[in-house]
Image (tube, rainbow, N blue to C red):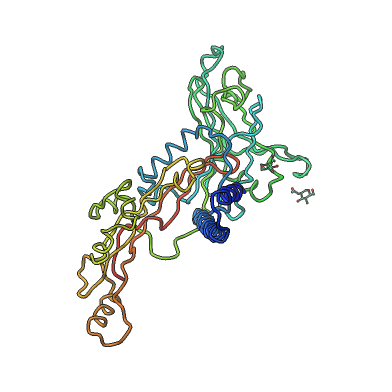
Amino acid sequence: MLMSAFCFASFLCAVAARPSFSYMENHFSVDTESEEIRSAAIKRLLEVFGMDDPPAVHGRKQPPQYMLDLYNTVADVDGVTKDPNLLEGNTVRSFFDKTRSEQVEYRFNLSTVARTEKVLTAELHLFKLRPQATPTFNRHHFCQVSIYQLLDAARANGTQDRKLLSSRLVPVHSSGWEVFTITQAVRSWMADEGSNLGLHVVARTLGGSPVEPKLVRFASGRNHHQSKQPMLVLFTDDGRRSTTLQSTGGAAAVASLPPAPLAGSAARRARSVDSGEEAEASRSCTRLPLYVDFDEIGWSGWIVSPRGYNAYHCKGSCPFPLGQNMRPSNHATVQSIINALKLIKGIETPCCVPDKLFSINLLYFDDEENVVLKQYNDMVAGSCGCH
Ligand SMILES: *[C@@H]1O[C@H](CO)[C@@H](O)[C@H](O)[C@H]1NC(C)=O
Ligand SMILES: *[C@@H]1O[C@H](CO)[C@@H](O)[C@H](O)[C@H]1NC(C)=O
């Protein structure tokens, strides 16, 4: 919409500046066409990242520290997966409590989770505050913290209005994050959205009596700093798998490859058609930089990290004889021999293509401004070979 308004504005400018209508008309149609290609290309790129539309982000919030730390654990500075075995699934979603109530009740809106997404683990992260009152019963160093799933009593035959999900001893004087696993409850909410009535947290003494609320407190979204908000963390798998090459290794494997110039100006040079182009084409198959800049694409508003990544590209010739450094398949070796012998017409030399691909990680805001970490397979050419 904005873009078409912009096109129309430039059309009007062109009318004022150009006396020849036919020239201007041609000029305009070319612009429209390239704009169409651009938007089709961006749409296709969004599909690669599993989205229909770019998330609408209204004023950026601070992402939860937990998600930033998780991202830095699984990804290197370029977003490339350090170790593919660190995450069980390929998606981690964080949600903030929607009730923001004063009570120890929490509710998370899971509408952004796709129906097809498989919930592997769900964790409730609560920030325990220091006791406000000095405990009158100093002999109790621990309390029992229990997480209940609220149920619709009418639906559950009126027998139960809550179900125990998780329970643990927590030191009364401690402060910091406490994590409770609540996977079963989240799975039931995913199966029936209407059943999501929220969670209730109860703290008791070891004897089973209720603990004074001033003694055992958890931060709420309403009264405490954003960095201490109750949070639901969902580890899921969206079922998207690599369909082509096996994605082996991670950044460690990248490191073992011959160093290629990184990012920035080198990448820009590689993209532009310059005088070095011909010389490059005659070079044998090699891996060259290809920097994908999310800022240039216009995605920096919703992507937290990385700002871009080096996808690399494969370029060069695969002439006979193919050395082992070109990592040829047997098929490619035979094809290059047939080509060299000119036994059959129309058989080209093999192609220089990625033969190892790595995944990257994206930390981004979704439509509801929840922070999501997602792994995408086959995004970075780890090495190139003649195939
Ligand atoms: C969850 O969020 C969606 C999208 O904003 C909204 O349509 C839906 O009503 C919300 N559900 C609840 C239970 O608040
Ligand atoms: C509700 O109660 C009826 C009869 O007591 C029983 O047959 C049924 O299985 C119960 N349903 C649930 C969901 O517990």
- Rendered residue at 43%/40% (across/down): 70
Q: Which of the two residues, 243 or 298, is positioned nearer the viewer here?
A: 298
- Rendered residue at 51%/23% (across/down): 142
Q: Is residue 239 visible?
A: no
The answer to whether residue 158 is left or right of residue 256 is right
Total count of labels:
0
Quadrant assignment for the C terminus: bottom left
Q: Quadrant of residue 280?
A: bottom left
Q: Position of residue 227 (x, y in %)?
A: 51, 28
Q: Position of residue 324 (x, y in %)?
A: 21, 68
Q: Which of the two residues, 182 or 27, is positioned nearer the viewer here?
A: 27
Q: In the displayed structure, would residue 37 be above or below residue 305?
A: below
Q: In the displayed structure, would residue 139 be above or below residue 43?
A: above
Q: Position of residue 250 (x, y in %)?
A: 34, 52
Q: Residue furthest bottom?
A: 343
- Rendered residue at 62%/44% (across/down): 110
- Rendered residue at 31%/78% (across/down): 348
Q: Which of the two residues, 184 or 206, is positioned nearer the viewer here?
A: 184
Q: Position of residue 363 (x, y in %)?
A: 47, 43
Q: Residue furthest front?
A: 19
Q: Is residue 108 visible?
A: yes
